Image (tube, rainbow, N blue to C red):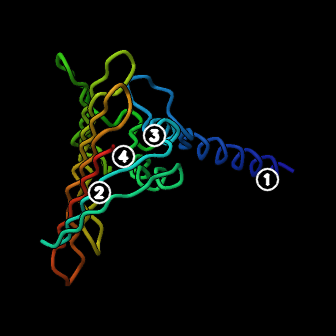
Amino acid sequence: MNRLIDLKILLLLLVLVSCQKLKPESVAIPEYPDFKSLMDDQVERLGKGRIKKEVWLDGKSEVRIIEMDSTKWAEELSFLKEINPNQPEYVGAFEKSADDQNQVLTLSPNEKGAIKKISFSKSDDEYQRITASFHEDKDVYIHHRDIEMTFEDGILNFLKIDGYQKMMFKDTVRFRVKVEVY
């Protein structure tokens, strides 16, 4: 009987200790912008329209005019979920700074994460500009993106992504995507 009580206590302690490491599904910290909700908002606000999309891949380029709808916008802006600092793994991970125009979140040196830096400016709760640096360094590949977005009256009007990918035993592939909204 005494051994059963000890086993129950041990099991209870294990459950309590393991629950302490759980992180919330989202972060409700106003200093961290929520780019997932920004993506949803932009998909709704942009609706149907046209973009001029220029893509460069290792020196070769292509330019297209594309008719957009909400599905295409959701796909085009899906990278915002990756660079969203409002994720559980980034709770307390950023050093915050600000100047007259921009708020800057820089990943602390002792933290690990693919989002290295985010800078954004807002006016009347509407984004004016967002820049981000995203860098994944995995065992078999390295993936880097520098992202720049500008907004007019809170609606995206320009997007540029510069980056490279290096796979193990392969050459580095450089790319750029530039989108202008009409």
Q: State which mark lies toward you, 1 or 4.
A: 4
Kind of residue indicated by mark 2: Lys
Q: Is residue 172 above or below residue 84?
A: below
Residue under numbered circle 2? 53
Amino acid marked by disc 4: Ile
- Foreground mark, 2 or 1? 2
Q: Secondary structure at mark 2?
A: strand
Kind of element beneath mark 3: helix
Residue that lies at the very extreme toward the bottom in this rendered image: 169
User: How many residues crowd around disc 1 within 10 Å: few (fewer than 14), some, or many (20 or more)?
Assistant: few
- Residue that carries the numbered disc 4 in the rendered image: 83
Amino acid found under the numbered disc labelled 3: Leu
Residue 116 x/y as whole percent? 25, 45
Camera-side mark, 3 or 1: 3
Measured Cα–Cα span from mark 3 to mark 4: 20 Å
Q: Using the numbered discs, state the Cα–Cα distance from disc 3 to disc 1 in whole angstroms.
A: 65 Å
Based on the displayed image, in which of its 4 quarters is residue 25 positioned? top right
Residue 46 numbered tag = 3
Q: Residue furthest left?
A: 59
Q: CA distance from mark 2 to mark 4?
A: 21 Å
Give the label, 3 or 4, closer to the camera.
3
Which of the two labelled residues, at mark 1 and mark 4, occupies the earlier sequence position?
1
Marked residue nearer the N-terminal end (3 or 1): 1
Mark sitting earlier along the chain (2/4):
2
